[in-house]
Image: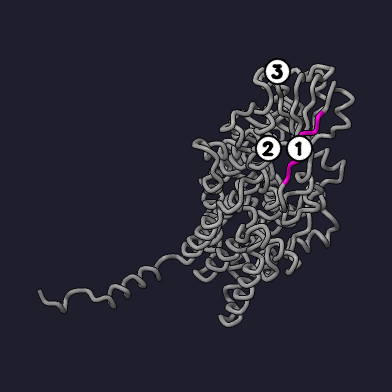
Amino acid sequence: MNDSVLPTSFTLTAAALDRVRKIPVEWLIAFVIGLVHLAVAGRYDIFRNELYFIICGRHPDFGFVDQPPLVPLLAAATQLFGDNPWLLRLPAVAAAAGLVILTASFARLLGGNSIAAGIAGLAAGIAPALVALTTTTTTATFEPIAWTAFAYLLTRAVVKEDRRAVLWAGLVAGVAMEAKYGIVFWSVPLGIGILLTSARRILAWPALWLGALFAVVLSVPSVIWQALRGWPFLEVHANHLAKGANFTGTPIGFETIQLFAMNIFFAPLWIAGVVAPFFWVPLKPARFLSFGLIGATILVFVAHGKDYYLFPVYPSLFAVGAVILARIRSVVRTVWLTAALMVSLIIAPIVLPILDPAALADYLAFSHLAPPPSEAAAVGAPLTQLFSDELGWRELEKQVASIYHSLPTDEQSRTAILAVDYGEAAALDVYGQRDGLPNALCGQNQYFLWGSRGYDGSTIIHVNGDPNRWRRGCDSVEVVGKFGVPYAMPYENGRPIFICRGLRRNLSEIWIRLKRYE
């Protein structure tokens, strides 16, 4: 054989590079974003809410006090073979990478070229707030991709006259409602935007109303569950409002947080997404999205929602803004995107578990970049609320297990383990299986509905309660320890564990007094 016809390393490299160049830029960005998330997914332990969702998912139902059923079922499914933070975060990794591709596709739908797709995808992949939402698997994790998919499908219907798209939009909205009720903050303003713009023509399509029916049918099981139990979700939110638990702040303060949370250098991108459809004819079909952002902002603010409730709207506006800003001079574009990338890299250790707790504490102290608390529960977090609430749970379980197994065998069988909040209770349930702990009791949210589980209160190991309060109702109260680790939340650090013996009233009789929907 003639050696001259054999491929050389140079030709093989050239061929490989040619293939890489043909890969859409958004797929490359998504690949990198996915790898970063995968690399750090298991560095910290399971987040308080993730623990709670796992336990809720192990009690399958059509709904729960403070959320629909989809995310708890998903969280529980990832832990079928034992607790594993890395497996738990795989759905979040998929949501982060998928958002990049979807946002870029959105820009292409609106007439954007590969540069516009790259800008939109990059913004969706590295905007700090969006990164933070996809660091853990919670009800907020899937809102950015769900809200963006809903807006994309409605836009496709308007731009392409694609009547099947509105059917899919209905399905997306229905599934999103089973993950978190927040889609209402987006779907209602988008509906108003459609009414106020030329997009209103799709209201005459039977397919649109069939899609709306799909959304309703998918939402009904969770809504019925809530109605049959007196709308506990609304009670939770009402209690938050009554206590001033959500720090919405002033309109200027709220918008300032939005600007920095999304990366200040991406502000021109989404602002252009709001404004450009009214001044540039090719983007006219996207005007209803502009009204959607304005309406969603008003709704979240008036409802005293947390700042992150609005974060899922931005990828849609990134897509719109990218179409117009892709046209600026390449030098300006390069400088702008480099600056945005640098800011996101600086903030990365605050939204991704890159640094260990001690190093993160030092970084926060040096940079003064700790995010302001969005709720009362976040006040005093040594790190950020997210990372501080991932620390100490295994240590708590080991300590309680040691106390439980130190009791005489006959006493263990009638001993209840009572925790103050669902994070403590869920940690004891998730990690306590291997140590033979009984199911924990708690009066907060879904745990309240599970009741006292037949325990009479003859012996209670109480985690984080007030010993002086319980002395009034118990024959004896013995403080047997304190729990907590460095950098955990203040209300989970240095807190007492005590044993109440001889509760003078049956635990089931006083259970209603432990109810806390919050």
Work out which quarter of the rendered image holds the C terminus and state it.
top right
- Dot 2 and dot 1 residues touching (CB under 8 Å): yes
> Which residue type carries mark 1?
Gly
- Dot 2 and dot 3 residues touching (CB under 8 Å): no
- Mark closest to the chain's N terminus, 2 or 1: 2
Q: Give the structural element (helix, strand or loop) at label 3.
A: loop
What is the number of the mark on residue 399?
2
Residue positioned 63% across, 40% down in the render = 51
Q: Nearer the viewer, mark 1 or mark 3?
A: 1
Residue 77 location (% of width, % of height): 53, 37
- Above or below residue 331? Residue 231 is above
Residue 46 location (% of width, % of height): 62, 45
Residue 322, by quadrant, is bottom right
Residue 479 location (% of width, % of height): 80, 33
Neighbour class for label 1 at 10 Å: few (<14), some, many (≥20)? Answer: some
Residue 412, by quadrant, is top right
- For this rendering, which residue is in front, 467 or 371? 467
Q: Give the structural element (helix, strand or loop) at label 2.
A: helix
Residue linked to disc 3: 454
What is the number of the mark on residue 481?
1
Look at the magenta stretch and give its main secondary structure: strand
* Magenta extent: 478-484
- For this rendering, which residue is in front, 223 or 1? 1
Q: Give the structural element (helix, strand or loop) at label 1.
A: strand
**Residue 301 on the magenta segment:** no
Q: Nearer the viewer, mark 2 or mark 3?
A: 2
- Above or below residue 448? Residue 294 is below
- Mark closest to the chain's N terminus, 2 or 3: 2
Q: Is residue 298 visible?
A: no
Q: Is residue 406 visible?
A: yes
